[in-house]
Amino acid sequence: MLYEASSGRSDEALEINPLYARDATNEIPKWKLAESEVLPSTAAQIIRDELALDGSARLNLATFVSTWMEPEARALMADTFDKNMIDKDEYPQTAEIEMRCVNIISNLWHGSVREGEHATGCSTTGSSEASMLAGMALKWRWRAKMRKASKPADRPNMVMGINVQVCWEKFCRYWEVEPRFVPMEGDRFHIDPEAAAKLCDENTIGVVGVLGSTFDGSYEPIEELAEVLDRLESKTGLDIPIHVDAASGGFVAPFIQPELKWDFRLKRVCSINASGHKYGLVYPGIGWVVWRNSRFLPADLVFKVNYLGGEMPTFALNFSRPGNQVVGQYYNFIRLGFSGYRSVQQECQNVAMRLSSEIANLGPFTVLTDGSDLPVFIFALTNTGGNFTVFDLSERLRDRGWLVPAYTMPKHREDLAVLRVVVRNGFSHDMADMLLADLKRHLDHFAKLSAPLPSGNRGGFHH
């Protein structure tokens, strides 16, 4: 978040309780450094008290980001906070672990890396940075192709559904690429392959397919998209690559929907990104991008940096960052293996589908997606114009700590307001029962109202 000037007084200060702040005489300023230090316990307690006002991460059904890891993983990550991921010469084994993770992920996505070879990919700070890197590779390859053909290379465009995560809009703005969006229509909440193909031309650097939309949890039809683009090439000669934004689905589909073709089994897919900190089950701060092979990553994007005594190739928007997130990912790969990941993701889906079914039976709701793709579902009021809205329900659920986002759909379906539930590792059937009980309690409250609740500022949840 970008913070701008506030209207708060510059002399505001934090009052310190003398019962635990043994060395504090007065107060600590909020907006500037204090003149002297305090005890470590005092500093920690001040911050801990403020953070108590945050919502509970375990009850946050808005976020896709992991909110729980095993104690052994937490300890291992704490031990490796101080290792700089970019300094591969000083921490060669951390670099080796990163490459092992890339190879494991490439193999999971049916990459064609031979025994003894390295997959082409890297870790990032999240799938947003991974998307930016993949988008840059698409643009650089398209630009080289246009220049080789002696054609203008100054008006690139990218085709995607209106449901893409905001990182793709950022990419297009920052790297001067025209975004071409396929709007939602009716009950279709993601890309339509035929409509996407109609937006493509010789300036299209690629089409983004999303394996797990943040708006409704559905998978876009990547295989159908590839087939449509194959037909487009046969008719026009346009060879349009696909990048798959598998931020969430990349660590779900291989385990519980293995028959689904969305990855490097499709020849038109040239790169894939995913979030290790979502269904990869790691705490926030880790993403991955993998290319089909080195041919799809232009060499002039890779820097060879002479740093601290060694030369290393690097392709990143960030430089220094802790290596502990990569270590956490590798821990999960070793700890869980294929069957462990499958068990975790299958249980998440079981909870999601049972919960969506129970919500559908409550009466006033229509379930629009049920968790059969990602363990994520959305539901809306069957009849609008009653005593409450989904925004009212979202607000009331906070009385017991539940964070269930309410929002309107984007262009062409702004009329539809929904609630979304993301089921992650650690959200059990018991917790689902507690959420259902609170939903019923609030529905009883709304039913007793003699008139609709007044509408206020309902901007809703931002993706």
Image (cartoon, rainbow, N blue to C red):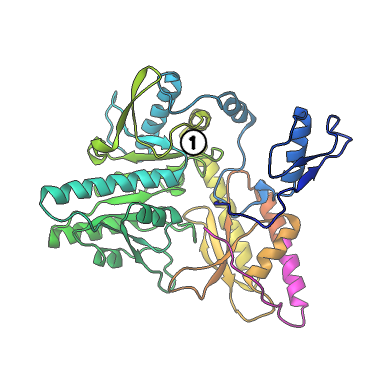
Q: Which residue is mark 1?
A: 339
Q: Position of residue 447 (x, y in %)?
A: 74, 76
Question: In the image, what residue occupies the spot 76% across and 71% down?
Answer: 444
Is 49 on the left-hand or right-hand side of 312?
right
Label 1 Cα neighbours within 10 Å, binned few <14 / some 14-19 / many ≥20: few
Rendered residue at 45%/20% (across/down): 91
Viewer-side residue, 156 vs 7? 7
**Within the magenta stretch, is there residue 122?**
no
Q: Where residue 30 appears, x then y in whole percent? A: 72, 44
Highlighted magenta segment, given as a residue range: 437-463
**Is residue 381 in view from this perspective?**
yes
Q: Position of residue 409 (x, y in %)?
A: 49, 68
| Amino acid type, callout 1 | Ser
Q: Is residue 268 above or below residue 462?
A: above
**Residue at left offset 49%, top offset 53%:** 374
Picture layout, residue 141 above or below residue 451: above
Query: Along the horizontal axis of the image, is 406 left or right of 125?
Result: right
Left or right of 185 in this view: 277: right
Between residue 359 and residue 183, name the one nearer to us. Answer: 183
Residue found at the very far right of the displayed protein: 19
Q: Is residue 449 magenta?
A: yes
Q: Secondary structure at mark 1?
A: helix
Where 326 falls versus 292 (above or below)? Answer: above
Residue 31 drawn at (x, y percent): 69, 45
Query: In the image shown, does 427 or 65 lie closer to the viewer?
Result: 65
Please tell me how many numbered marks the rendered image carries: 1
- Residue 267, relative to residue 36: is it above or below? below
